[in-house]
Image (spheres, grey):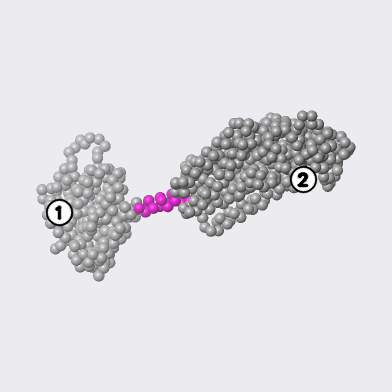
Amino acid sequence: MNGIGPIRLWVLALALLATVWPFAEARAQIGQAVATCIKPIRSGDRAADLLKEPQRFDCTSDQSSYGRGDFWVLSQPLPRLAGDPRERLSIGFASTWQDATALHILYGDGSIHHIAFTSATTSPYLLLGAMIAVPLPRTDARPVRILWEAHGAANLRGVVRGARLQQHAEALEVESDLSLLYGAIMGMVIALAIYNLALWPALRQPLQPVYCLLLFFITGYALCSSGLIGQWLPWLDNNERHRWNAIMLGGVALTIVVFARHFFEREVFRGWLDRLAVIVFALIAIPNIAFALLAPIWIRPLDAAVVAGFAVLLVFLIAVFVQAWRRRSNFAWAFAIGWGTPIVLAMLRVLNAAHLIPWHPWIDQSTVLSMGAEALIASLGVAYRIYLLSRERDLARADERVARRLADTDPLTGLYNRRAFMDQAIGRAGAQTLILADIDHFKRINDTLGHDGGDEVLRIFAQTLTGAVAPDLLVARIGGEEFALLVDAQRAPDTEALLTRLRAATYPSGLKVTASLGLCTGPMQDESDWRRLYREADQALFAAKDGGRDRACWGVAIDMPPLTAPLLPPSRAKRTISGGRKAFARTADHDGGTGAGPDRPRLSPSDGRHPPDHP
């Protein structure tokens, strides 16, 4: 990724957060904040008496310091809201783990109205953002104080958090905006999951199913933490929603560990980081599983263990990025951009859980929003990683093709070598004509021009030979100065025209170069056919050399395999030599392709092949 890439992606992430953040902030900005004080419930306490005795409440201590139990929470005098006083008011506060909640509302005329619900009947009051909004009964008098009665409160980070007096219509308007936001986030996440699942059968990258699992847990966490699942399933107990919220968040954390291991190259996790990943996985899995199974038993120590596991996860992710940067990973910046925003906001969430910073509604909203941003940015990171892998695969294939081409090519002339020629020649259907071309007196050429000049002659000869025949004809250099051509028998080139082109080529120092050709026609179905055809063409080339060079000699044609058993004995064939001023014919028995007649010239013992290439 070039230098401008990360900057553009960071700008994209910030633009996304800048777009959606006002919706989350809107929940915190409507109405006016209401300060609260706390007191444990004691036997004999009466709501009416407590509303008249606010001095009995603790207004300075952190509510969570009281631990788990049953509590009274009293509001400070309620503020007056601007606008039409006839508009219905509601009191909003964050949803927390409680078995039952009752609101006692004191009005200016001294009347007290009561609204009660349990964790199983919270759904009608649950809004997006996991905020509870309880509409206040309408009377001629205005509400002046509210007293909460909470039973079975886990009090992990407060009994009543983020209380705000608001106009109920305004709260429902924000609800509509948030529904669009959460719908867009979940729609994007689901689309990314479907997209990656569709690509997986083609790309087969192990990262993709892991990423889809991560998107599943992100979607589940968004449904649970936002309260949307409580609206969809009104029968769902609100405490059970909190339990599933913890399960999904734990699933996100565990999948992030696996995702990181698959996202980077193996070298990044080699050694201590791989062992740390296993430890982090266990530190996250054990408390989350215990919380899901045991809560509300030991809920506070279990919650502390879960928070500690997430703190370890953040340290682990930072260590992963540092190690990837040190190992010069191609994916370091993609990981940092995709997970930078969630990591920063998760740190704030951990700090709030550790009571190091105060709670704010946007802290809860930020988790879902940052995960939505992460899903978008991480999808770009996954796409970038897939692009790099595809490019590496394409480069590997290109290198393989180049290596295969080099292995199949004669480096001097650029023609096929003997092995590649045989690979492409053997197995061709129908009768084939094999042409062997050998430069005449090549030893004398080497002695005259030197080896460099001889190499140049070979290159020019190869270019002339290739240019003189059809483009689809198979041409190769199969020996020092020996070349081979193969073509369908019906399209065999004219030998005289070919010899003429070879003579007319311009060679170094004005040297005149000629060649001898040996030709034979026959099948090329298997290697035994190749050996027979080559042997016959080689004998024909020997005859052309023996006949004076600069000419072509046709060997005895080899019969094609019969479709049925032959009824007649094999026929006898003629070998003819043409070219120059001489022509002669010889008779040879067709005895399995040997073509060795009684008067066939034998190979010279001087080179074991052709007669010596000198006058």
| Label 2 residue SS | strand
Badge 2, how many Cα within 10 Å: few under 14, some, many 20+? some
* Mark closer to the chain start, 2 or 1: 2
The residue lying toward the viewer, choosing from 439 and 246, is: 246
Is 388 within the magenta? Answer: yes
The residue lying toward the viewer, choosing from 59 and 399, is: 59
Q: Residue at x 17, y 51 (%)?
A: 539
Place of residue 238 in the rendered image (x, y in percent of width and height, measured from the top left) = 68, 33
**Residue 30 visible in this rendered orientation of the protein:** yes
Badge 1, how many Cα within 10 Å: few under 14, some, many 20+? few
Q: Is residue 474 left or right of residue 45?
A: left
Q: Is residue 393 left or right of residue 32?
A: left
Place of residue 433 in the rendered image (x, y in percent of width and height, measured from the top left) = 26, 49
Report if the CB atoms under discs 2 and 1 are less than 8 Å apart.
Answer: no
Q: Of the residues tagged 2 and 1, which is closer to the observer? A: 2
Q: Residue at x 78, y 43 (%)?
A: 34
Place of residue 349 in the rendered image (x, y in percent of width and height, measured from the top left) = 64, 45
In the rendered image, the vertical position of residue 51 relative to residue 375, given as above or below: above
Q: Is residue 601 left or right of residue 479?
A: left
Residue type at tag 2: Ala
How many numbered markers are drawn? 2
Q: Residue at x 60, y 34 (%)?
A: 291
Which residue is denoted by mark 2 in the rendering? 33
The magenta stretch is: 387-403
Place of residue 285 in the rendered image (x, y in percent of width and height, measured from the top left) = 55, 37
Which residue is denoted by mark 1 in the rendering? 608
Quarter of the rendering containing residue 500: bottom left
Q: Residue at x 44, y 51 (%)?
A: 392
The residue lying toward the viewer, choosing from 180 and 330, is: 330
Q: Residue furthest bottom?
A: 509
Residue type at tag 1: Gly
**Residue 198 visible in this rendered orientation of the protein:** no
